[in-house]
Image (tube, rainbow, N blue to C red):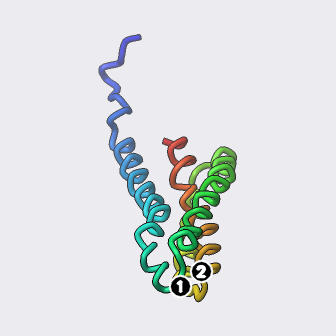
């Protein structure tokens, strides 16, 4: 197969670089959502007066939310494209961080962080990688 010299290679087009840049930004935001609870672990421990095991529970639920959300958001991305799942993921991340900020108990942090943020982060991994 010979390439047409009059037609540029779409591999290095401006659109391809733009898509790569957007994917890197979105993956970074999603990655921060997954790992920010690990950074805040000592503060969660101190604020709620719990041991390390109890303070790690939000992370556990985040990974479960990430797993379940990956399946749901992947199916949604296959049916209607990546835009709607990314919007839902961004909304879930926003609501999760706001809810964690207002949480008064460890259970509220666990549910808000684990379910909303874990679910939101799932959009920035599997479906986004499949789209690229």
Examine the rendered structure and indicate whether residue 38 appears above or below residue 127: below
Q: Marks 1 and 2: in contact by CB < 8 Å? A: yes
What label sits on residue 48 in the rendered view? 1
Q: Nearer the viewer, residue 36 or 70?
A: 36
Badge 2: few (under 14), some or many (20 or more) residues near its Cα, within 10 Å? many
Name the N-terminal-most of marks 2 and 1. Answer: 1
Please, what secondary structure does the residue beneath circle 2 have? helix
Q: Position of residue 112 (x, y in %)?
A: 61, 74
Residue at 54% from the left image edge and 60% from the top image edge: 121
**Any part of residue 89 in sight:** no
Please, what secondary structure does the residue beneath circle 1 have? helix
Q: Is residue 61 left or right of residue 25?
A: right
Q: Quarter-wise, where is residue 108 in the image? A: bottom right
Q: Position of residue 91 (x, y in %)?
A: 58, 70
Q: Quarter-wise, where is residue 118 in the image? A: bottom right
Q: Quarter-wise, where is residue 92 in the image? A: bottom right
Badge 1: few (under 14), some or many (20 or more) residues near its Cα, within 10 Å? few
Circle 2 sits on which residue? 106
């Amino acid at each position: 197969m010979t390439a047409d010299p009059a037609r540029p290679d779409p591999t290095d087009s401006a659109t391809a670089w733009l898509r790569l840049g957007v994917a890197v930004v979105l993956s970074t935001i999603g990655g921060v959502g997954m790992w920010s609870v690990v950074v805040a672990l000592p503060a969660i421990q101190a604020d709620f007066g719990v041991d390390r095991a109890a303070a790690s529970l939000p992370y556990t639920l985040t990974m479960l939310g990430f797993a379940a959300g990956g399946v749901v958001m992947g199916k949604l991305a296959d049916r209607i494209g990546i835009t709607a799942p990314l919007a839902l993921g961004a909304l879930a991340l926003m609501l999760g961080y706001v809810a964690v900020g207002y949480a008064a108990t460890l259970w509220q942090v666990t549910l808000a962080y684990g379910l909303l943020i874990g679910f939101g982060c799932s959009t920035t991994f599997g479906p986004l990688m499949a789209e690229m």
